[in-house]
């Protein structure tokens, strides 16, 4: 028997302009959706999503090139023999096989790893979180607001004030003014994400005001390779620093011990739900606090992330809430802003009727 993989590119607009410090544009997203089928299981299809980020060297075109290489590395005989008892080891071995085929390319790996988890879960009648040995009970998500004029950011914050925490993109010329404006309309925790845009002097100078404004954490203030700067600021900050662009895969974790308090794990960076679960578990072993983030993905990509969210301290899974025209359904946000994971097999996600 053989595996068949099909893919399509989707482009969807944002509900509101969304911009971060290290990227231009902000009108919409582009992502790759894959469907994985086994010839012997004609009624089953595994769904996956890969969101390419040029910062990590990926594009829609590179995903198309890499996917067939990854597919060819899957041991189909082992897949056909998978059981509830062996599923975890099998899926981990596939992730190792992907890394042996090609380094990096986390979004392409994420698309296929997600689809494989979905397919195996459906084959065994188990939700993905159960395949991974995780709980369906997860913390609430925050909501992210992109860079813009302070008054515009504050208006968006007011509309999102029912979320338990807000993540505010910073790294522009009016960061403090923006955060002051948000605090006037929102009383909960604020998380700030500079996406590598600050200098050490800026970061140190802002710390007292961030503390005064009730900021909960600072995400990636400096360039990814400047671990010396991250360590320098963490030593001077009573707020936790969280590495994002500096924490791409599990191999980055040991180098971040003593440098930052936490790491932001994203499936599109590390290669899917399996690698994310292993990276989060290892981060906790090393004493790092854990943050689960996302790209501007559909609810398919967000669902894959939600299935590993029992391992984290902070959750930022709002990508599908930022876009219009999500083509998938099955993932519901509860009144307490927690994604609701059910006992449905696989990811619990399906395409919306045409």
Image (tube, helix red, strand yellow):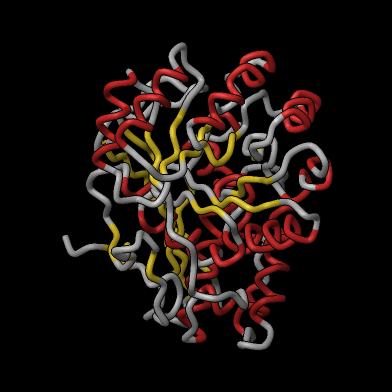
Q: Is residue 92 above or below residue 145?
A: below
Residue 302 in picture, x, y percent from top left: 43, 56
Residue 12 in picture, x, y percent from top left: 28, 40
Q: Is residue 5 above or below residue 189?
A: below
Residue 339 in picture, x, y percent from top left: 39, 64
| Residue 24 location, quadrant | top left
Residue 44 in picture, x, y percent from top left: 41, 77
Q: Quadrant of the N terminus?
A: bottom right
| Residue 287 location, quadrant | bottom right
Residue at 27% from the left image edge and 34% from the top image edge: 156
Q: Nearer the viewer, residue 140 or 1?
A: 140
Residue at 58% from the left image edge and 20% from the top image edge: 206
Q: Is residue 164 above or below residue 191?
A: below
Residue at 49% from the left image edge and 67% from the top image edge: 138
Left or right of 119? Residue 181 is: left
Residue at 81% from the left image edge and 25% from the top image edge: 228
Residue sticking out furthest to the left: 354
Q: How many marks?
A: 0
Left or right of 330? Residue 310 is: right
Q: Nearer the viewer, residue 312 or 265?
A: 312
Residue 270 visible in the picture = yes
Q: Nearer the viewer, residue 48 or 171?
A: 171
Residue 31 visible in the picture = no
Q: Quadrant of the C terminus?
A: bottom left
């Amino acid at each position: 028997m053989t595996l068949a993989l099909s893919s399509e590119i989707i482009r969807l607009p944002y509900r509101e302009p969304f911009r971060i410090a290290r990227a231009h544009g902000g009108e919409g997203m582009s992502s790759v959706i894959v469907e994985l089928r086994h010839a012997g299981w004609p009624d089953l299809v595994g769904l996956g999503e890969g969101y390419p980020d040029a910062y990590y060297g990926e594009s829609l075109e590179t995903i198309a090139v890499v996917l067939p290489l990854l597919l060819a590395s899957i041991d189909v005989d082992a897949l056909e023999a998978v059981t509830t008892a062996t599923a975890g080891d099998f899926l981990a071995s596939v992730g190792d096989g992907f890394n042996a085929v090609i380094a990096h390319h986390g979004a392409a790996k994420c698309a296929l790893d997600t689809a494989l988890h979905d397919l195996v879960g459906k084959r065994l009648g188990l939700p993905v979180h159960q395949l991974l040995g995780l709980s369906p009970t997860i913390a609430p998500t925050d909501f992210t607001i992109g860079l813009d004029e302070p008054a515009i950011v504050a208006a968006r914050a007011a509309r999102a004030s029912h979320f338990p925490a807000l993540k505010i993109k910073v790294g522009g010329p009016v960061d403090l003014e923006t955060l002051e404006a948000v605090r006037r309309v929102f009383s909960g925790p604020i998380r700030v994400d500079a996406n590598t845009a600050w200098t050490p002097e800026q970061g140190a100078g802002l710390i007292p005001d961030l503390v005064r404004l009730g900021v909960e954490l600072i995400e990636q203030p400096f360039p990814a390779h400047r671990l010396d700067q991250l360590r320098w600021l963490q030593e001077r900050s009573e707020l936790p620093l969280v590495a994002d662009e500096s924490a791409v895969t599990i191999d980055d974790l040991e180098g971040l011990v003593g440098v930052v308090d936490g790491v932001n794990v994203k499936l599109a960076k590390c290669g899917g739900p399996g690698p994310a679960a292993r990276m989060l578990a290892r981060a906790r072993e090393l004493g790092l606090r854990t943050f689960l983030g996302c790209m501007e993905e559909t609810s398919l990509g967000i669902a894959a992330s939600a299935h590993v969210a029992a391992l984290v301290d902070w959750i930022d899974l709002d990508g599908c809430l930022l876009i219009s025209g999500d083509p998938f359904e099955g993932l519901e946000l509860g009144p307490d802003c927690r994604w609701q994971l059910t006992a449905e097999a696989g990811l619990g996600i399906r395409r919306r009727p045409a």
